[in-house]
Image (spheres, rainbow, N blue to C red):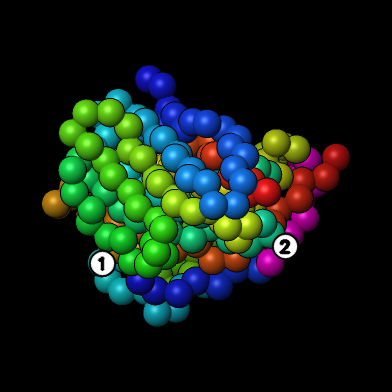
Amino acid sequence: NAGVMQNPRHLVRRRGQEARLRCSPMKGHSHVYWYRQLPEEGLKFMVYLQKENIIDESGMPKERFSAEFPKEGPSILRIQQVVRGDSAAYFCASSPSVGTSGGPKHEQYFGPGTRLTVT
Amino acid sequence: DAKTTQPPSMDCAEGRAANLPCNHSTISGNEYVYWYRQIHSQGPQYIIHGLKNNETNEMASLIITEDRKSSTLILPHATLRDTAVYYCIVRVGNQGGKLIFGQGTELSVKP
């Protein structure tokens, strides 16, 4: 069973360009999360999606950032008009269906990350 | 979600047990304790979780005190590959949602 896949692993963009980061969850997982790790800082939650729905985007910057998880295909994190401060590692995680009783079923499994460098 | 407190760093000799403490004195009755780790530059890795009973899997053991205000992650025979930042996270169990990572404990396993 393949793990969470992210591509590209490394992405270089010039200021003002767009960055598209892709995440394919583990087979059978319908929940996707995006986290950002700035250099020398901790992991910060950005957004939580289920198929075709954004559940929690409380960690997303108000401008330039968007995320989607379509019915078919990978989840996409899109950053428009990138700036140097966007340089970071972006991690995607997926989890199986949420349990409603009998204990949690939602440990999150992380991908290897995409390292974005803005020049 | 309840706040957790962990020591910023710890050392452990290779082959010895690594005991990583976590305080979560404000934990609620429906909150679970989760442990993740992040080996340098890699994505975080789920280790183990528990509610009130001690838990063990192939990676580690989790000991939760009776009052649930603290817990200890035990790596029984630490190896150099266990060098990582270990995160203790408390959150409501049977719901999806974000993980809130603190600063964690940087464990250095030394030969």
Q: Quadrant of the N terminus of chain A?
A: top left
Q: Is residue A82 above or below residue A114?
A: below
Query: Is disc 1 placed on a helix, strand or loop?
Result: loop
One can see residue B62 in this view = no
- Which residue position is annotated with label 2? B9
Q: Which SS class for mark 2?
A: strand
In the image: residue B27, left or right of residue B92:
right
Across and down, in percent, residue A47 comes to 35, 55
Residue type beneath disc 2: Ser
Q: Do the dots labelled 1 and 2 sit on one chain?
A: yes
Q: Indicate which disc, 1 or 2, sits on the residue closer to the N terminus.
A: 2
Residue drawn at x 40%, y 46% is A78
Given the image, on which type of amino acid does mark 1 rest? Asn
B65 on left or right of B43? left
Disc assigned to residue A15 = none
A72 sits left or right of A93 in the view: left
Determine which of the numbered discs, if any, sits on residue B30 in the image.
1
